[in-house]
Image (cartoon, coloured by chain):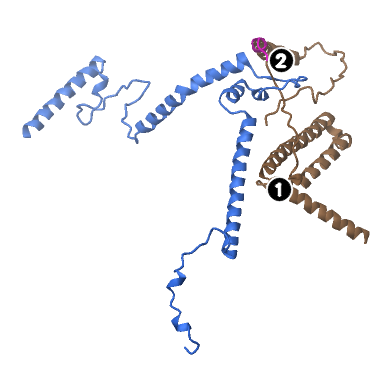
Amino acid sequence: MSKDSDWEAYKVPPTRTPVSERTTTVPNPVTFFQTVFHYVVDAPVTFVREWIERQQAKNKFYYYHQKFRRVPDLSECLEGDYLCFFEAEAQWRRDRLVDQEIVEIVRERLGACKQREGPNQLQNCAKEAEQLAQVTKAYQDRYGDLGAHGNARTCLMKQKQRMMEERKAQANASQ
Amino acid sequence: MAAMSLLLRAAAAWGARRAGSGAAGGFRFPGLAGAARLPGTVAPVRHSSSHGKRMFIIKATSFYDTRFLNLLRFYIFLTGIPLALFITYVNIFIGEAELAEIPEGYIPEYWEYYKHPISRWIARYLLDPPEKNYEKEMALLDIEAKKAELRLMELEARRLMRHRGDGPWYHYETPDKNLTDNSMKSTPDN
């Protein structure tokens, strides 16, 4: 799945560096390089890009994210109903892709937080780190060791194993 | 053969005389570098300054390699360059689609779920709609499932008819009962 990079999602607030008083008469060489960069690289590239966008704005068209209807799950399919198996399998694969994207987004959030905070990231990004730990643990529990040929059936069996172990743990705890 | 050696010796003497007169004159042909020189005379040789002495360098042939690489480049660029130009044109002048929310009450066509215009074109004109593909796969599965079910039922029917013997299958030709000779069982003392 290709991803549109969204510049606005993790925008850092503008820096509030105060304007400093000049104490020397030597001009700042950085401004020279900045103006050179602006005229040599920035302005031509911006001009070309805006020209391209003007050409593309003449006929705009859109694409959408497809919304799929929910179909009965694998656990609701009768035995031998291969059509139901097929639809449940397709739905399970779509759900697995969605879960992978969710994990990716939470990872990106943590990365953006670390980039923003810099030196005090261990302290200020604790919520995002906790969320990532929970999400990856949940993903591992659900889709973890199914392997490359994992399908809805193996995932259901894994869920059954989890529930059995949970019940056993409860029985042991209550003894 | 003897005359040849005399001829060569005369030519060498004549060449040395010419070389001697040439050194006095100051002009020298560059080609007569080691041509005919008496032993003992060393004439300075002037080569063209950019290349040095022309050498015949013996190396393995690169004819086949260069031919292969030229042909490879030619055939790749034959379709590669038009394709690259076409894709550049599409990317610059048509551009990719923008993501939008599905408007109320509007069901997008199946090609409107792709971003790049070439992917949209392929999905629209070359490929089947995903709904049709889905239904085709489900139809195949249905046919195979019905075939499997019928085969199992046939095996079960065969087993039962063979076992019970009251069905239309498993009839074997037996000889007529009127042909049997019961004379050896007709008296009790046999």
Secondary structure under tag 2 reads helix
* Position above or below: B174 against A168: below
Could you tell whether A52 is left or right of B84 in the image?
A: right
**Which comes sooner in the sequence, label 2 or label 1?**
2
* Position above or below: B155 against B3: below
Image spot of residue A148 (x, y percent) = 66, 46
Chain ID at mark 2? A
Position of the C terminus of chain A, as image quadrant, is bottom right
Q: Nearer the viewer, residue B117 or B43?
A: B117
The answer, for residue A145, to whether it is visible in the render is no
Q: Amino acid at mark 1?
A: Arg
Q: Nearer the viewer, residue A132 or B189?
A: B189
The residue wearing badge 1 is: A153
Image spot of residue B116 (x, y percent) = 63, 22
Could you tell whether A118 is left or right of B107 in the image?
A: right
User: Which chain: brown?
Assistant: A
Identified at 74% across, 29% down, the residue is: A67
Q: Colour of chain B?
A: blue
Secondary structure under tag 1 reads helix
Image spot of residue B92 (x, y percent) = 61, 15
The residue wearing badge 2 is: A33
Highlighted range, magenta: A52-60
Chain ID at mark 1? A
